[in-house]
Image (cartoon, rainbow, N blue to C red):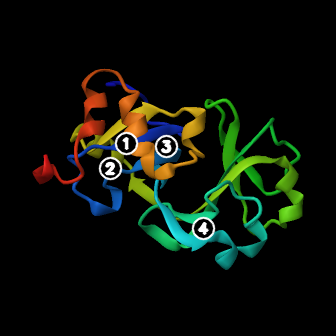
Amino acid sequence: MEGIEVSAGRLLVSSPMLGDPNFARSIVLLLNADDDGCLGVILNRPSTMPVGEVLAPWAGIVRGPGVLFRGGPVETDAALAVARIDGPGDDLVGWRPLFDHTGLVTGLVDLDTPVELVEGGLADMRIYAGYAGWSAGQLEAEIDSGAWIVVPAEAGDLFAPEPERLWGQVLRRQPGEVALLATMPADPTHN
């Protein structure tokens, strides 16, 4: 898996060596990666908070489970809406495309936009409280230390119906020894 570019649309799979509990067994979707740093959301951390309790107008738009996801430890009181559309979305109000290499165009929806202006144009959407962020060079250093494995995303990863199982699923489909990490227990003393 060496040499996969760190770019928007890639997945970061936390390795068992990653000691930060915020990211244990996490899958992070990179939304932005440039010279200033990287930003992403954790795909496999649904909360128990229904979207309707916090952002009622969006409750009928999100793809199940209909809860807020814990996107990461940064700005946990802020919300990011990640969505996919069927087409370019050039005329979709409140939409900012980010990447399209997973089969559908993926981007961000401005949650201040009236729902009726975007609801017909969205194929899928989830809302994340907080995000994961790295300053310039920080993520690359963590990857070099073995904390993260960079892998291509598949279209089904972003809106997996059972997000809690995503870490193992993504690892199992990787070639070679990386796939073996999926069988590692959460607590190695239980091995």
**Residue at mark 4 to residue at mark 3: CA–CA distance:** 22 Å
Quadrant into which the N terminus falls: top left
Q: Which mark is residue 79?
A: 4
The residue positioned 39% from the left and 44% from the top of the image is 167
**Up-down: is 94 above or below 114?**
above
Disc 3 element: strand
Query: Quick one: which residue is furthest to the bottom in this view?
Result: 53
Name the residue type under label 1.
Answer: Val
Residue furthest left as drawn:
189
Give the crowd class for mark 2: few <14, some 14-19, many >=20 residues within 10 Å.
few
Give 22 or 60, whichever is nearer the viewer: 60
Disc 1 element: strand
**Circle 4 or circle 3, nearest the eye:** 4
Q: Identify which amino acid the numbered label 2 is placed on.
A: Gln
Cα distance between the residues tagged 1 and 2: 16 Å
Q: Which mark sits nearer the N-terminus, 1 or 4?
A: 1
Q: Can you say whether 14 is above or below 177 in the image?
A: below
Q: x, y (%) of residue 139?
A: 35, 46
**Residue tagged by mark 1?**
13
